[in-house]
Image: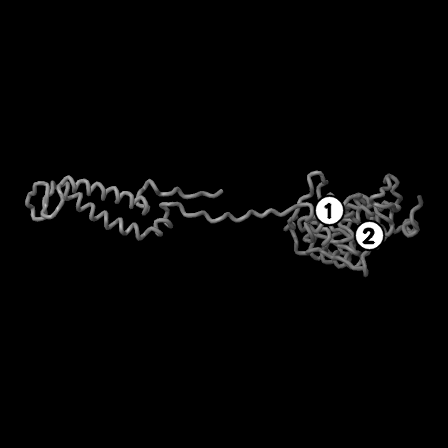
Amino acid sequence: MVMPAACADLVAEGVIEASLETSLTPSPVCGTFIPVRLTAVRLADGRMIPLKPAAISRCEMTVAAAAWMSEALAPAVAAAGGVLSAIRIADSYNCRPRNRVAGAKMSEHGRGNAVDVGGFELGDGRVWTVAKGGLPMALRASMKDSACTRFATVLGPGSDGYHEDHIHVDLAQRRNDFKLCHWNLDAGSAVASRKDKPGANAPAASAESGAGGASEDKEAAAAAGTAETEPESAPVPAPKGSAAAGKAAQGKGTAAKGTDAKGTAIKGAAEKGGQSTNGQAKTGQTNGSKPKSAQDKSAQDKSAQDKNAQDKGGGSKSTQPRQSQSD
């Protein structure tokens, strides 16, 4: 196996440090290509800056990534107040589906056509990372502009929930050379939420993109999970004795109240031994009235009717419904 000419020339010129990656086993799923292991790039000031770890990709991606790092990223880091000493690589060649979601389309990483940048190490020991808004805003803006000009796909924080800690760039081939550039520079430390979770038997989601771009990544991710909605509960009929039932039986309650008053008067008369209102004693019978025994029976009947009316009208304490509870 011989290194492609484009990469071999850059190595010969001292522009990059690279070698053939011989440890990879060709995979029919991910296709065959000549993998190049990029370990360092030379900056304009002559310094050779290492990649940690080395980025493995096909030669075309190696050439594009090396040019972006030396011509755009290093000057942008310097303009933001840092001296670049190393470039952190989050992912490169990886034979896997998009976003590591089982059943999704093949990632451009699986074709050796993508590189993810996770951050930068500086000469003074500082580390600027993409995660949690760790890059200065000026650096973010410069990186996005240069990346979206050079690559077919750029995905960063705020794009789809899978690129919150790195910048994905690839050379996906699309009709009419269509390009995708999704990176919310204001995402800061607010991590975009993932709308799905990979299957239990799938690897954890991480660095990724693919020929379909961010929109297709989202569709593949949506297919991995389902949204659950809790149905609304049906209205519960008002139990007998409740406020609603009592209101409906208001007329009956009114009638019962009147009967109650009458029954109380009769009962009171019976308890007084049949005395009339003028205080004259009777022998258990008033003028035109029923005998005392009949009055007692009538009072008992009325009392039973009053109790029944109160039960129906919600007046009885024992018939009050217990307030429903919801979980």
Residue 275 quadrant: top left
Q: Kindly tell me whether residue 120 is visible in this rendering.
A: no
Residue 220: x %, y % from top left: 72, 49
> Residue 65 shows which numbered tag?
2
The three-letter code of the residue at mark 1 reads: Asn
Q: Where is residue 84 in the image (x, y as percent from the top left)?
A: 77, 50
Q: Mark 1 highlights which residue?
A: 99
Q: Nearer the viewer, residue 103 or 88?
A: 103
- The answer to whether residue 9 is left or right of residue 276 is right
Is the Cβ of the residue at disc 2 closer than 8 Å to that at disc 1?
no
Horizontally, residue 46 falls left or right of residue 205, namely right
Q: Position of residue 318 (x, y in %)?
A: 33, 40
Tell me if 278 is positioned left or right of 320 in this view: left
Residue drawn at 93 percent across, 45 percent down: 2
Q: Earlier in the sequence, mark 2 or mark 1?
A: 2
Q: Is residue 76 left or right of residue 26?
A: left
Residue kind at label 2, given as amino acid type: Ala
In this rendered view, identify the residue nearer to me: 162 or 62.
162
Instruction: Give neighbour class at mark 2: few <14, some 14-19, many 20+ (Cα, 10 Å).
Output: many
